Image: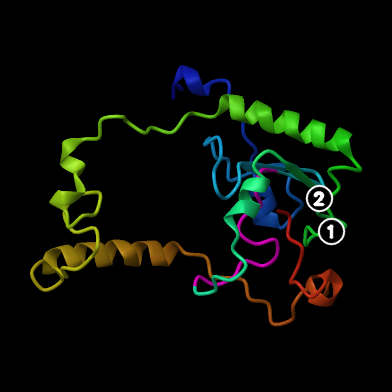
Amino acid sequence: MQLHKSLTDRDGINLWPSLSTSSPSPRNEFVYNYDSHPSPLEGHAAIRVGDYKLIDGSPGFYNDWYKPDHVTSNINISDIRYWTTKYQLFNLKDNPNERHDLSTSKPYMVKKLATRLASYEKQAVSPNFPELPDPKSNPQLYDNVWSPDDPNERHDLSTSQPDMVKKLAARLAWYEKQAVSPNFPEIPDPKSNPQLYDNVWSPGWC
């Protein structure tokens, strides 16, 4: 197989041994939700290296658990904009709930992670937002929704196209046979006791 020139300088990590044997992951670095917009409402990006996580920009609407959609209290857009040019640093091993910002006490770690995040940003491919949209994607052609045909799924074709139903159902059954059953242990791992993590289930790697 010949790789495109733009892909030859990329690398990766084989996680299969870790996944298949439940052994520690070889990954020690992770980038979250990179957004190339200069001032996105829900943050710019975050990176974890080892135990430390650096958030570049807004952490989101809430500084705690993310509330259901019907809860609209405590949403303050001005607070979100306040974070646009700021960093937050957390030690996820000691503080999995991210309540103790270390950005002022550990400026060297902020600089280290910010530099690493910047290196990823330089490799990022800019999103494709064409200035002249394809006229075939005009939402007026599709009940004021972008994209063709029936994107709102309002017209059930199961009775008029039984052959297609059969084809897709067979394909879905094929995937189901390959699916791995979820792991729901009857005896939870004592290390995931929420009392160990300020009443939150497991700190998780992220």
Q: Residue furthest top?
A: 5
Horizontal arrangement in the rendering, residue 98 relative to residue 2 (left or right): right
What stretch of residues is rendered in magenta? Answer: 56-69
Measured from the top left, where is residue 127 in percent x and y?
43, 33
Give the side of residue 182 with respect to residue 111, left or right. left
29 above or below 184? above
Give the quadrant of residue 149: bottom left
Residue tagged by mark 1? 95
Q: Amino acid at mark 2?
A: Phe
Q: Give percent across and percent down for residue 16.
A: 63, 48
Query: Which residue is at 44% across, 21% downward?
Result: 4
Q: In the rendered structure, which amino acid carries the disc numbered 1?
A: Asn
Q: Which residue is mark 2?
A: 90
With 80 as the anchor, is 127 left or right in this view?
Answer: left
Label 2 sits on a secondary structure element that is: strand
Residue 31 picture location, percent across and down: 65, 42
In what quadrant of the picture does the N terminus appear? Answer: top left
| Residue 61 among magenta residues | yes
From where the camera sits, is residue 95 visible?
yes
**Circle 2 crowding by C-alpha within 10 Å: few under 14, some 14–19, many from 20:** many
